Image (cartoon, rainbow, N blue to C red):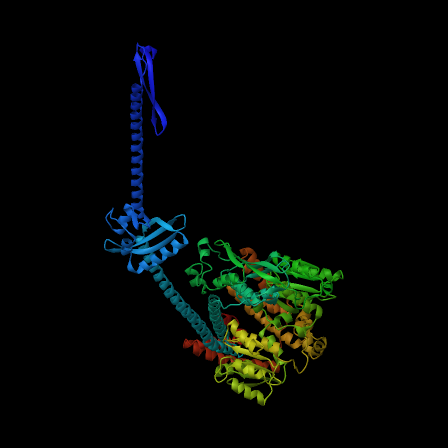
Amino acid sequence: MQPLGGTTLLVCSILCNGKAIGSIGFMYVNQNHQWGSDEIAFGCHIADQIGTAFLNQERIAMTQALRQNEAYLNRAQEVSKTGHWHFDIKANKLTWSDETYRIFGVAIGEPQTFETYLDMVYPDDRQKIIEKWLEKSVQGQPFTVLHRIFSGGEVRWVEERSEFEFDLKGNPIASWGTIADVTEKMKYLEELESYQKHLEEMVLSRTTELEMAKLEAEAASQAKSSFLSNMSHEIRTPMNAIIGLAHLIKRDPLTMRQEGQIDKLTEAAHHLLQIINDVLDLSKIEAGKMQIDRHDFEPAREIDRVCNIIGAEAAKKNLDLLVDIDHIPTVLRGDSVRFGQILLNLMSNSVKFTQTGRIKIIARVIKQDQKQIRLRFVVSDTGIGMSKEQIKNLFQDFVQADESMTRLYGGTGLGLAISYRLAKFLGGDIGVESEPGKGSRFRFELPFEISTALPKNRINIKSSKEVRVLVIDDMLEARELMISMLADFGIPCEAVSSGKEGLAAVVKADQLMNPYRLVFIDLKMPGLDGIDTALMLQALELKIKPTLYLITGYGNQISYEEAQRAGISRILVKPMTPSTLNDALMELLENEMESKRPSSIKQLEERLKSYQQIRILIVEDNQINQEIVGQLLEPFEFKLQMAGNGQEAIQKITQDNFDLILMDVQMPVMDGLEATVFIRSLPGWEAVPILAMTANAFEEDRRKCIAAGMNDHLVKPVEPEMLYRCLIKWLPVRKSQPEKKVMLQGDSAIDRRKHLAATPEERNRLKFLRQVDGLNVESGLRILGGDISQYLRLIQQFGRKCQVDASGILKQATEKDYQHMIQKIHSIKGVAGNLGAMKIQEQAAELEQAVRNRTEKDLLEERLNNFIEEISGFANVLPKERLSSKNQHHDEADRVQIDMILNRLIKLLEKNDTEAYDLFEEHKDLLLLTLAEAGVDLER
């Protein structure tokens, strides 16, 4: 104030809403002044006006804010289609927001009452609103109601939410709330409900369709199963006739050509049968009808069975079969049939695609606890192998590695697919590793249960310690496996790699008074083969001669008679497994030839011929099958009766007694199952063996037969071997006399009688033969049972054969016809061994091996010349046979027969008639002996 020169000051406060927001001052300059009341009142009035101006400005701002908020609210309500309202109950006055007016389609500001509101409500919803209003107003609770209204000439859906206001006495005086237009929401709900209803109808329809499809699929599956079952039955019935008649035809004398044709026919029939079985198995797996049949079994014996099945095919290719099952349990509990099926498929596959080398089975324990064990089986081969692309589709149905394999190797492509599904079905897994040209390695793992059952005929370890064994085998791996298996039995064993080493070991052991009790000899070895080695062992002067077992993968190439002549007690077919070895050692230790299980058709037939007074009823509606079964049983002294159906069978058994019944299943009038149930109900027929002989091959068919009371189940076509084994298993043992034990080394008393019966001339010739270098007369006589006449005759024939074959072998060597050359040398080697011509046998073995291995030309020529010189010299040194009148008579008869055969042969050849081949085969031996080299040329 002083800078302005002021002397007196009046200050008035500016108030706004009771708060001082500032002040205004009045001042006199350069003079003193006493402020009067009017001046003060004027100052205060000015201050009040200023305060009022500020107050109005604040009110304007608040009003603008309220209007803005109201605009926001109206906009929000418009966007959300939600309005609000207030109802004064006493005044019956409704106050609506702008959006509420828009929802009802009424002009904004038009007065509303409860009655005008109800007029706009859809008639069907008015009573609901009134009841809800009265109920909630009494209860004093808020409520929500969904209803329809008329708005602008259309029906719309609204949702109202409301609360009440009460006076002090609790009477409602007002209510307020919101209203939302939910027409679109209700349309969506209606559409959703319609869609849901439609969806439910679709689901119901689809469910019905699925049910129908399921029923149709089940019906189709049943029809498929029925079709396959009927197809199996219809195919197996004629297949039974084919295989059965083929077996019967082979009983009659056949030419080599006819025998080969019959073998091919049988092979083709078995191949077709295998395809049928594969298709049926695949069908059962797909239909989920396959069941696990758990039982105790010996895995080694199941491996034996599989190897026996594929052994013939492996033999044709000279493949070695090896088994290494380490220390897996001797007895397991599981499905041996499915395990064997997987193994057979994999082994068959390996044999098919392997041309040379070996196939090996390995078994190892992967995991084991007190109750369960998991095993891994590996089948490895040295075959053609596969690429990664080929492996991808390997386990699919009807698929092979590529199409060219189907053309080259044949097959349906089902075997591996079935193996894959079976492995999965049993809870296991399967896979393969392979490279082109390096073979394949199939592996599969399966779970089994630990079994407490004991193995059959387990060798006594205490007894086994008394056995000393020698193994003669050229394959190192085979020797090691044999040593390992024998060690598990507690048997001391030595092994050598050749026949010569084996002979030396036997002689040394005998000299040291610690002889070998058993010698295992491999058939196929370089130098001396198994037969040659056995013959030389027999010729040795030993204090104690060992028992000889021949091990071969080529069992069909040596007859039981030839093995007997070589002093071999038993032929064991590769691969050697603990069970095979166990059985062989049991036979040696117990010497129970009667308990020996027949291993060939001939042995089975011989066993059955010993049964006497056996009565068998054959129940079969097919006449051809009746004839086949009758002819299969014809060689035995059985009394057979036929019945065409179950009813006839029942009539037969009421009239006669039978030891066994062969029962077909599907027959007219009364089937086999019904007949069996009836027969079992009859007194005295509870234990008579009834064997199903049917084309129904499913597992469930077998179970039905067993459930009906049958003892066993033979599937058509019935293999003669299976039929014979089954008969031996179930027929009552009623033999005329005990079976005689086979004597492999001859009867000395008979030998002496035959020797004394020889003429002086024959004894002189025999004395001369004992002086021939390289000829062991005693060995030959031992093989022939001491028959001097027969031995002298065979020696002369062998001498003539050597003369004829010497020029033939030289000619074949010149023409490089090695295949026929090997056959001729092998033939001479076998005959020489049987007759005791040891030097010729040894040189023949060396020459045969040299030709097979395509030895160097100089060495081959040297061995060839030595061999020709030896057999020619042998033929020349033999004494000339003097023809007796009896021999002259036989020679004249032979010449007449030769002339007739040659005349007939010339006529057939002139006509180009193929019967000439059959005629030559029928009289081959006589023609070759008479025509010599010309006969060999004619044969070629």
Residue occupying image coordinates x 33% and y 15%: 9
Closest to the observer, 134 or 576: 134
Q: Is residue 875 visible?
A: no
The residue at the point 29 percent across, 27 percent down is 53
Viewer-side residue, 895 vs 562: 562
Taking 211 as reference, is 432 above or below it? above
Percent across and percent down for residue 704 are: 53, 75
Does residue 627 sit above or below 109 in this rendering?
A: below
Residue 473 in the image: x percent, y percent? Answer: 63, 60
Quadrant position of residue 579:
bottom right
Q: Is residue 70 left or right of residue 783?
A: left
Q: x%, y% of residue 115?
A: 28, 54
Residue 482 shows in the view: yes
Location of residue 640 with respect to 413 vertically, above or below: below
| x then y, percent, for residue 442 | 52, 58
- Left or right of 248 in this view: 776: right
Residue nearest the viewer, comparing 934 with 704: 704
Q: Is residue 518 left or right of residue 192?
A: right
The quadrant holding residue 560 is bottom right
Front-most of residues 764 and 347: 347
Q: Quadrant of the N terminus?
A: top left
**Which residue in the rendered view is the most extreme toward the bottom?**
655
Task: Locate residue 797: give its quadrant.
Answer: bottom right
Which residue extends farthest front? 37
In the rendered structure, the answer to whether residue 882 lies left or right of residue 137 reads right
